[in-house]
Amino acid sequence: MDWSPMGPRDTWDKMAEWLRGLASTLDQKPRAILVVSAHWETPEFTVMTQERPGLLFDYYGFPEHTYQLTYPAPGAPDVAQRIQALLGEQGISVRTDGERNFDHGVFVPFRLIYPDADIPVLQISLKNDLDPETHLRLGRALAPLRNEGILIVGSGMSYHNLREFFGGRSAGEVSESFDRWLTHSVTELSGEARSEALNNWSKAPHARLAHPREEHLIPLHVVAGAAEQEPGTRVFSDRIMGAIVSGYRFGT
């Protein structure tokens, strides 16, 4: 993997292999991709309108080659307009940003998923209050996009405690307990019951140890809201520097 932020060289190999094979598991190639990244927060939901986004190297202290990466996927201003209309219908305020570039929550995984960079991509921000229900509601408003050939992706992490990662301590029991709760909530519950569980995620076992700040979890709420009545499946799991990290997919 050409972007390896933490751990020994092979730390992210299993995840990279999974990402490289992800496109082949989809029924069809998306018309466009909407990404909800943990790395973009604004006071109001904001959607990218750039036609040719560059890259935002929103990290520091990494090897020089990680600042030379490229991912020349086109933007999707037409999808941005559609999103504005959908959110407006639900009374959800949304702004636009014509200068925002892809952050590493986009270009790192998608260089592996769709390396040809031939599918239009855009982002919508998290609202910086990180309220779970607000983001579930956002997902519900975006749901029609799924029937219009648009893939909605939540880019975050099911466990995100950097102090534990960088401190070299095992997250073992904490991540295992939280992962069991999260996997049960996503895959065994559905509809309002799943949304209720995710809305109250902070009551889960070791929730605030797994996510001292929840920006890496909340993208999941958006995607879950967009597929509220559809089944969830755990499609990836690995132990990374002692912590269990999982990925989920909604729908068939």
Image (cartoon, rainbow, N blue to C red):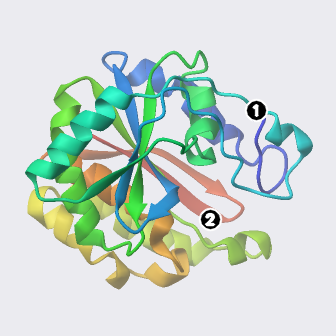
Kindly identify the residue that appears in the image at 51 percent across and 23 percent down. 74
**Which residue carries the number 2 mark?**
243
Note whether residue 198 is visible.
no
Q: Earlier in the sequence, mark 2 or mark 1?
A: 1
What amino acid is at disc 1? Answer: Leu
Q: Helix, strand or loop at disc 1?
A: loop
Note whether residue 97 is visible.
yes
**Which residue carries the number 1 mark?**
69
Q: In this view, does 122 lie above or below 130?
A: above
Viewer-nearest of labels 2 and 1? 1
Spot the residue most to the front. Answer: 98
- Where residue 56 appears, as percent x and y from the top left, is 66, 45
User: Which quadrant of the structure image shows residue 132?
Assistant: bottom left
Counting every numbered tag in the picture gives: 2
Kindly identify the residue that appears in the image at 40 percent across and 69 percent down. 43
Which of the image's four quarters has the N terminus? top right
Residue toward you, 68 or 183: 68
What amino acid is at disc 2? Answer: Ala
- Where residue 235 appears, as percent x and y from the top left, is 42, 41
Kindly identify the residue that appears in the image at 79 percent across and 76 percent down. 167
Q: Helix, strand or loop at disc 2?
A: strand
Looking at the image, residue 129 sits to the left or right of residue 225; the answer is right
Residue toward you, 148 or 200: 148
Spot the residue most to the right. Answer: 64
What whole-number distance in Å separates the C-alpha atoms at marks 2 and 1?
28 Å
User: Which quadrant of the structure image shows residue 244?
Assistant: bottom right
- Where residue 125 appears, as percent x and y from the top left, is 42, 55
User: Which quadrant of the structure image shows residue 227?
Assistant: top left
